[in-house]
Image (cartoon, helix red, strand yellow):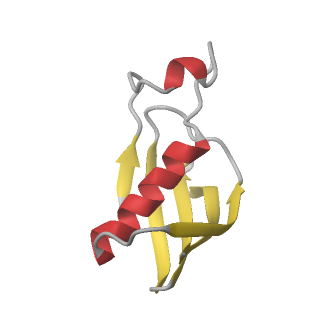
């Protein structure tokens, strides 16, 4: 699932003034949306492991990749770089609570 956080998103002015970065919680919200898109509403979830590897800037296209099935999924969030490759933004696990 691809997503873009637009420059006008309401969370960006405070994160960080003058040099906005997409907050990690917003990146994780897209991960959960990707899981629910494939499996429906899941209720309470845990994030036993999350690692943020590089920033995501407003306007950059990011992609959520998922592996696994209920009750546990591994995820990666990637964005493109100038050379046409992928840069890891975040990775981790989501589990049913």
Q: Is residue 84 visible?
A: no
**Which quadrant of the figure contains the C terminus?**
bottom right
The answer to whether 17 appears left or right of 73 in the picture is right
Pinpoint residue 12: horizontal percent, then vertical percent.
51, 24
Pinpoint residue 35: horizontal percent, then vertical percent.
39, 70
In the image shown, does 13 or 44 lie closer to the viewer?
Answer: 44
Compared to 73, does 56 lie above or below? above
**Which quadrant of the figure contains the N terminus?**
bottom left
Pinpoint residue 81: horizontal percent, then vertical percent.
56, 47
Which residue is found at the position 34% from the left and 68% from the top? Answer: 36
Compared to 1, does 74 lie above or below? below
The answer to whether 78 appears left or right of 32 in the picture is right
Q: Is residue 35 visible?
A: yes
Pinpoint residue 49: horizontal percent, then vertical percent.
70, 68
The answer to whether 74 appears left or right of 30 in the picture is right
Which residue is found at the position 42% from the left and 24% from the top? Answer: 10
Q: Residue furthest top?
A: 18
Compared to 52, does 5 lie above or below? above
In the image shown, does 88 or 21 lie closer to the viewer?
Answer: 21
Name the quadrant containing residue 37. bottom left
Which residue is found at the position 50% from the left and 44% from the top? Answer: 26
Which residue is found at the position 71% from the left and 53% from the top? Answer: 53
């Amino acid at each position: 699932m691809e997503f873009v956080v637009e420059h006008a998103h309401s969370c960006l002015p405070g994160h960080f003034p003058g040099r906005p970065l997409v907050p990690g919680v917003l990146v994780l919200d897209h991960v959960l949306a990707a899981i629910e898109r494939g499996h429906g509403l899941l209720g309470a979830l845990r994030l036993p492991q999350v690692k943020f590897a590089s920033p995501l800037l407003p306007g950059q296209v990011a992609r959520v990749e998922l592996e696994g099935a209920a009750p546990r999924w591994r995820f990666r969030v990637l964005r493109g770089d100038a050379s046409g490759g992928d840069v890891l933004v975040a990775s981790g696990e989501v589990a049913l609570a």
